[in-house]
Image (cartoon, helix red, strand yellow):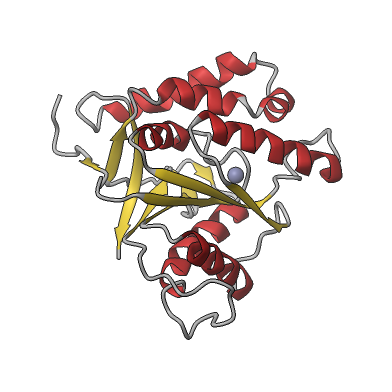
């Protein structure tokens, strides 16, 4: 089933990746299956989450919700072999694109020194169908910008870590215009379990059984993307080289 819209495989010659997203759960709606494949191959992946997702559960006050969602995110990360998760403490729902955010992200990139940066769709929409949220737009754009900021010693010269100009690619998950993909055959089951760790969030969101909800979504996305990747279950990215 080859067509002319087949995606390229993601580059494989890297050792450290840093995934930066707005909320706990952003990486679990698909991307985590690819993370499982990467950590299996001995690569190191770290998560930086810009807010604690404290505005994400209608029935729970932010002061309770934030710590709960941080715990769920750490458990999700552990399922796919990610040991380190940092939370930057920006306010959920009203994350502002700007110099303050770029500075925090450049500092994170300098601390972790990744070759591959991963973030979530900063476009206006999801595939032209659903309007994207302001937090996703702000964080995704700031990650793309901070890849360059981190390497310039004259931009944000006062961060603790030294400049890091080693980011070679930024991979945007959930893009409406993907260019690359990862075969997630071996990571899919952990991708499902990783999303299931957001149990309190999912239970507040839907009446469905969390496992059925997670399995239908994660397997459904991967099957849909398979059409563009030789029939293999896939997670797709729009890749920007630097
Ligand atoms: Zn989100």
Quadrant location of the C terminus? bottom left
| Residue at x 46%, y 52% (from the top left corner) | 18
Left/right placement of residue 23 relative to residue 179 reads right
State the image coordinates of residue 193 (x, y, percent, origin top left): 54, 22
| Residue at x 77%, y 41% (from the top left corner) | 67
Name the one closer to the observer, 65 or 134. 65
In the depicted structure, whether residue 44 falls above or below residue 229: below
Q: In which image quadrant can residue 165 be found?
A: bottom left
State the image coordinates of residue 80 (x, y, percent, origin top left): 48, 32
Quadrant location of the N terminus? top left
State the image coordinates of residue 24 (x, y, percent, origin top left): 63, 42
State the image coordinates of residue 5 (x, y, percent, origin top left): 19, 39
Name of the residue lying farthest toward the bottom: 154
Left/right placement of residue 147 relative to residue 84 reads left
Left/right placement of residue 16 relative to residue 93 reads left
| Residue at x 56%, y 14% (from the top left corner) | 212
Left/right placement of residue 124 relative to residue 151 reads right
| Residue at x 83%, y 33% (from the top left corner) | 59
Q: In which image quadrant can residue 229 be found?
A: top left
Number of marks in the rendered image: 0
Quadrant of ligand 1: it is top right
In the depicted structure, whether residue 74 falls above or below residue 222: below
Name the one closer to the observer, 22 or 104. 104
């Amino acid at each position: 089933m080859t067509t002319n819209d087949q995606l390229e495989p993601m580059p494989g010659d890297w050792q450290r990746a840093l995934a930066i997203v707005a909320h706990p759960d952003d990486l679990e709606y698909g991307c985590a299956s690819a993370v499982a494949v990467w950590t299996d191959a001995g690569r190191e992946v770290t998560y930086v989450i810009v807010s604690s997702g404290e505005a994400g559960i209608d029935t729970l006050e932010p002061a309770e919700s934030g710590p709960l969602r941080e715990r769920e995110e750490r458990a999700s990360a552990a399922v796919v072999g990610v040991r380190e998760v940092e939370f930057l403490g920006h306010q959920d729902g009203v994350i502002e694109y700007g110099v303050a955010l770029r500075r925090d992200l450049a500092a994170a990139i300098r601390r972790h020194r990744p070759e591959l940066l991963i973030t979530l769709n900063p476009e206006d929409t999801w595939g032209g169908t659903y309007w994207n949220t302001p937090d996703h737009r702000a964080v995704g754009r700031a990650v793309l910008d901070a890849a360059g900021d981190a390497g310039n010693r004259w931009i944000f010269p006062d961060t603790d870590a030294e400049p890091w100009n080693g980011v070679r690619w930024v991979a945007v998950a959930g893009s409406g215009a993907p260019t690359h993909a990862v075969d997630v055959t071996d990571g899919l089951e952990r991708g499902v379990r990783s999303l299931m760790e957001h149990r309190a969030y999912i239970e507040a969101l839907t009446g469905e059984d969390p496992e059925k909800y997670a399995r239908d979504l994660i397997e459904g996305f991967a099957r849909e993307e398979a059409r563009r990747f030789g029939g293999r279950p896939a997670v797709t990215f729009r890749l920007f080289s630097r």
